[in-house]
Image (tube, helix red, strand yellow):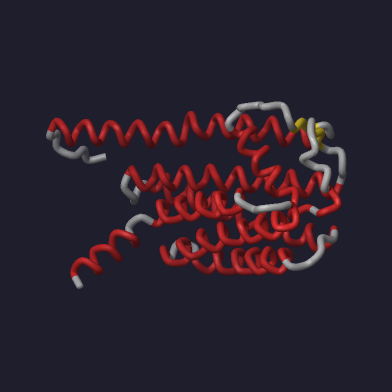
Amino acid sequence: MTGRKSLLEAYQERPYRNIFVALLAVILVDALAPNAGARGLFSDLMVAAALFAALFETVRSRHHALWAILLGLPAILARVIAAFRPDTTAQNTTVLTLSVLFFVFLIWNLLHDLNAGERSTGERIFGALCAYIFIGLLFALIFAHMEFRHPGSFSVSNELLAERVAGESAQLQIFTYFSFVTMTTLGYGDITPIAEHARTLVWFEALLGQLYLAVMVAGFVAVHISENMKKTRGDPPSDG
């Protein structure tokens, strides 16, 4: 019984680690989609699963739980419904709006909680990584919707978008790849923004991704290393 209680307590003490693992799991599952027909279904369900994991942990921590429910449940339900219905402009715009609102709330809530400094440094690192993945998924949703509404906003050097008629959801996996390649400034060049608004969003995401890693994540990692060095030397904990 004590072992079970300790395991449960350990789980509850690491909400951001739980979200991070869930995010990686759903992204990997989405990557295993066998064909374009399944890709749209998996992509919508992937986003819904990621949102549900974040909603569960946010509500359980009781920080802004009411706002999380009000914004999260409609976004999740809309994603699940969209997974089993044909794409239309009105439906996709509604789903995108609800998803963006909840993603923005999650990112803001995460960053606010991390800067409060009430969690362990290791947990804050996982929280910062969760926010990083949420930012990437947020831009992926916007890019996919942009290409769906205005075909030709992005140029693709191969046949990735040959199945454009399959709809926005089928393109989400492609733009998830593009979004994270952009954030990390890898720049493979197989997808290129053409429209002016697309180029603006792409360079903004690249700049945001680099500043985030250099300032937020690197700062938490530096603090974590410093704390471990103090423990190794046996220094007393600082008052700050």
Judge left or right: residue 20 versus residue 37.
Answer: left
Viewer-proximal residue, 27 or 214? 27
Give the image quarter of residue 196: top right
Residue at the far bottom: name it. Answer: 1
For the image, the number of numbered tags is 0
Judge left or right: residue 84 versus residue 227.
Answer: right
Q: Position of residue 197 (x, y in %)?
A: 80, 36
Viewer-proximal residue, 34 or 42? 34
Q: Position of residue 192 (x, y in %)?
A: 77, 30
Q: Position of residue 149 (x, y in %)?
A: 85, 49
**Residue at the spot 25% in from the left edge and 36% down from the top edge:** 227
Above or below — where is 65 with respect to 176? below
Q: Position of residue 94 (x, y in %)?
A: 76, 61
**Residue at the spot 82% in from the left edge and 33% down from the top edge:** 155
Judge left or right: residue 97 versus residue 150.
Answer: left
Viewer-proximal residue, 107 or 33? 33
Above or below — where is 91 with respect to 142? below
Q: In what quadrant of the picture does the C terminus appear?
A: top left
Above or below — where is 33 with respect to 75? above
Residue at the far front: name it. Answer: 34
Judge left or right: residue 76 versus residue 25.
Answer: right
